Amino acid sequence: MLLTQPSPSSVRLLSRHPLLGQLRTWSVARRRMSAVDSKPQEAQEKHDAESAIKRNPHGDFSKVQASRPDWDESRHWHYTKTRNPHWTYGSGATDKSGSSKPHVSIDPYAEGRQPVLNYKLLISGIVPRPIGFLSTRSKDGSSTNLAPFSYTQVFNHDPPIFGVGFSGGFDNAKDTLKNLTETGECVINIISDHFIEAANACAIDLPYGQSEWAVSGLTPAETKVVAASRVKEAVFSVEGKLMSTQEFESRATPGKKTGVLALIEGVHFWVREDAINEDRSLIDPGVLSPVCRLGGITYARVLDGFEIPRPVLRKEQKEGKIPDDLLKPKIETQ
């Protein structure tokens, strides 16, 4: 997708934000647009988009669900060894079969290839992805929104910077993006398996004026810096202030705006007491029990992990773990 600068009517820089100054306001026409008139259209567009994507490959999912084993409550987070604890430098992949498998070359802009195919390919290949559960409040405080976004990632720690991707441009922005750009505030909650069904319910195309909080049954909790509520059930939540936005333009359909990236500064953290270590620097993955997004409508639990120290050349050489003949100029091995 082609990077384009946001139009002056798209965003405003926050005057109160220490990093970036004043966020440009939405156009007067957009601010005056009747939310009552636009919401049914937005819901229909969301329904149409789902139909076009065909994310759910099943005809009757209830039958598929019934055929599968129950959720195993007995399984808990634990550590294992690495795949091959005896791996040595220069020995390559543990499973050598991968290097002999053929690959398929894909041009994302090939004639006749629909952008939705790239979407489905990317969300199934860039995995696992964390799910940002964004809580926002409208500028006048009369409306709230709660929605999951799997285009979410942390990019920096000083200051704490997060990126959230939104489908569609500013012209057809949904409630979360509207609220975020108009107020410059949000809360990013991380989804855990103990409330995954409730979080998923917040993706439903509700009629205008109806609350995701009520439909999901989740609990709004107090915040320190922003007006939006955090999700009390979330083990980890981040209060955030909008830094900037970047709108993207389609290569397949020039002129069509297809997405927006929002960069958000984390200004306050909330961690459940039983999940954080003594110096408040590490969250217990067993308590967090994060849910990650895969392709289609597939999600995954995080149940086991392994630790692998980062190597230091001088130490590895001193211990005789890396032979000198493996230390070659890059040009010889490229």
Image (cartoon, helix red, strand yellow):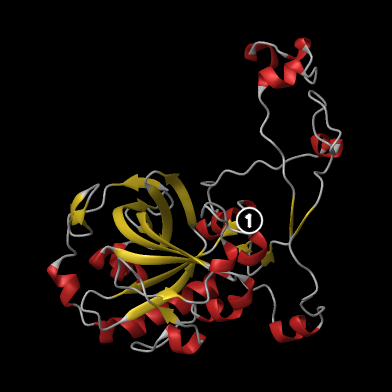
Residue 66 visible to the viewer? yes
Q: Residues within 10 Å of mark 1 (few under 14, many from 20)?
A: some
- Where in the figure is residue 71, as x and y percent of width and height? 76, 77
Residue 58, image x and y in percent?
A: 70, 77
Which residue appears farthest toward the left when viewing the image?
Answer: 28
SS at mark 1? Answer: loop
Q: Three-letter amino acid code at disc 1?
A: Pro
Image point (57%, 43%), residue name: 107
The image shows residue 35, relative to residue 120, as above or below, that is: below
- Residue 169's spot in the image, x, y percent? 34, 61
Along the viewing direction, whichever of 251 and 130 lies nearer the viewer: 130
Residue to which mark 1 is pinned? 128
- Nearest the camera: 162 or 252? 162
User: Where 103 sits versus 227, above or below?
Assistant: above
Task: Note whether residue 254 is visible.
Answer: no
Q: How many numbered marks appear?
A: 1
The answer to whether 258 appears left or right of 275 in the picture is left
Q: Residue at x 15, y 71 (%)?
A: 29
Task: Locate residue 120 relative to residue 306 in the image: left or right.
Answer: left
Residue 213 appears in which quarter of the rendering? bottom left
Residue sitting at 69 percent across and 65 percent down?
Answer: 301
Observer-nearest of 104 and 23: 23
Q: Quadrant of the C terminus?
A: top right
Residue 74 position, x and y percent, is: 80, 73
Which quadrant would residue 11 be assigned to in this image?
A: bottom left
> Most extreme residue toward the front, as rendered?
278
Tell me if 206 is positioned left or right of 109 in this view: left
Question: Is 98 or 190 nearer to us in this picture?
Answer: 190
Residue depicted at 16% across the width and 65% down the height: 27
